[in-house]
Amino acid sequence: MSEIAVEYLLARPGREPPQRGATITLADGKVAAVAAGHGEGRGLLAMPALCDAHDHVRGLHHLAFGARDQNFELWRAALYAQPAIDPYLNAALAFGRLAQAGVGTVMHVYSSIRVDRLAQDAEAIARAARDVGVRLGFVVPLRDQQTIGYGPDEELLGLHEPQDREFIRQTWLYPFPSPATYMDLVADVARRIEGPTVSVQYGPNSPQACSDALLAAIGQASERDGRRITTHLLETSIQREWADAAYPGGFVRHLADLGIVCPRFTGAHGIWLRPDDIAIMAGRQAQIAVNASSNLRLRSGIAPVAEYIRQGMPFSFGVDSFSIDDDEDALREMRVANWLFSPHDTDAPLTAELLFRGWHRNGFLAVTGQDGYGDVVPGAPGDVVVLDYDAMAFDVIEDMIDPTEVLLTRACARHVRSVHVAGREIVRDGRVTGIDLPAVEREVIAQARASGARMRELKPVLDRSQATLKRFYGEGLHRRGPPAQ
Ligand SMILES: [Zn+2]
């Protein structure tokens, strides 16, 4: 049992003003009681811990291995040079940074295509989540086509320089498992890692990377076992062009017909959804995980959140391993989203209530499958972040501003004092308690730098590959109509 005393409690964030003076008692993983009065908690503010509903949990940042920010389709090729790092350490580093930024729940969209290593990687990642103490939604990567770009792999491979083709084939063009084998793989991963704070989801990497047979198998399996589905959805204008050409009858309609777009569905990004797509998603209460900073950094655009709001489609938020300062600061991401989606000239602005609903209730549902998170009330999950309110409000004149506004204008990871998840204190005095984060960071960087010679050797390959992809998309070769299935 533990007690958290604070001066301000956002018990119902965005819906009620903060409660002045509160002591929260956590027991058996839940909020046991909330009492008035703050004792030693002067200068502190508490609210439910954040949920990062879309992330790739990359402890080593993209920039470190040469993947500079640029448009997504070209950026992706830079993953060729991604060094081999211990999956436990890489995940622990990202989980630790997110926890120190007030995150209690993380969606890990794992994107390795090494099926042979998947089960052991999943175990290492789940162990990292448990050691750090965050709740984890592990998304099993599933794909069986269009790995190099939005066209047949062999054709795209043929456009590459002859000397690079074998390397690219070895890196990305494994023989893909059948849909049935993939479904068994998801069940196997679930048997190995699921528990009270870890759940497993189906992860069609993106609809363009999956055959209809695979998507239909996922839709049926999810309907049967209730596991959620996470995919990337219409992140870029190039994806929109591909989708319109490949599915002239309606791309989102097609995904809905296959059983993918359903109440258990989370699509990341959704920038290029049109109102008719949003209507289909809203009708099924499928949600989008918005990744505002990622979309800015990869020049993808700004999600049409006002239209989501108008049509009542649920949405959550993610860091996507692309926070605006490349530091996993989810609190800053919350503020970026707040500013970006509440312009003065819209009839459907993002309100504080909707912003918190995304970071709390909808995000928790997307990751854990459990509804109702987001209030600090008896019986709620024991997931609470405590911030140094006095540091945020160092110059504020008392009673001149709602503390919620101070939070939404200034909160950063550096203000986080403690984070509890399922009643366990995973961050104390601003530092993760379960692992030695600075040591893990040093080790990850050392492991990456040990692959420096190999990475430098690959750099010309990825530069040439990016030039090839740029020509492919520049010539509109992704807009050629339905793929052969
Ligand atoms: Zn992503």
Image (cartoon, rainbow, N blue to C red):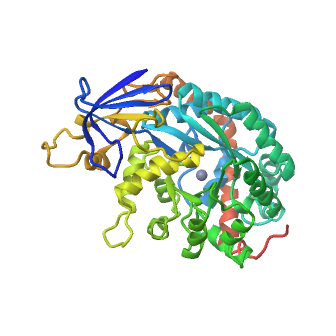
* Quarter of the figure that contains the N terminus: top left
Look at the picture and state if 299 lies above or below 420.
Answer: below
Task: Please provide percent x and percent y for residue 298.
Answer: 53, 58
* Quarter of the figure that contains the C terminus: bottom right
Task: Please provide percent x and percent y for residue 314.
Answer: 51, 59
Look at the picture and state if 291 lies above or below 437.
Answer: below
Q: Which residue is depicted at the point 79% across and 48% down?
A: 167
Task: Please provide percent x and percent y for residue 101.
Answer: 42, 37
Quadrant hosting residue 212: bottom right
Label total for image: 0
Q: Which residue is depicted at the point 70% across and 63% down?
A: 468
Look at the picture and state if 79 lies above or below 432.
Answer: below
State left or right for residue 264 relative to residue 299.
right
State left or right for residue 7 relative to residue 462.
left
State left or right for residue 66 relative to residue 335.
right
Quadrant hosting residue 420: top left
Determine the residue located farthest toward the bottom in the rendered image: 248
- Is residue 458 visible in this depiction of the protein? yes
Q: Which residue is depicted at the point 75% across and 64% down?
A: 258
- Is residue 322 visible in this depiction of the protein? no
State left or right for residue 439 relative to residue 238.
left
Task: Please provide percent x and percent y for residue 81.
Answer: 67, 44
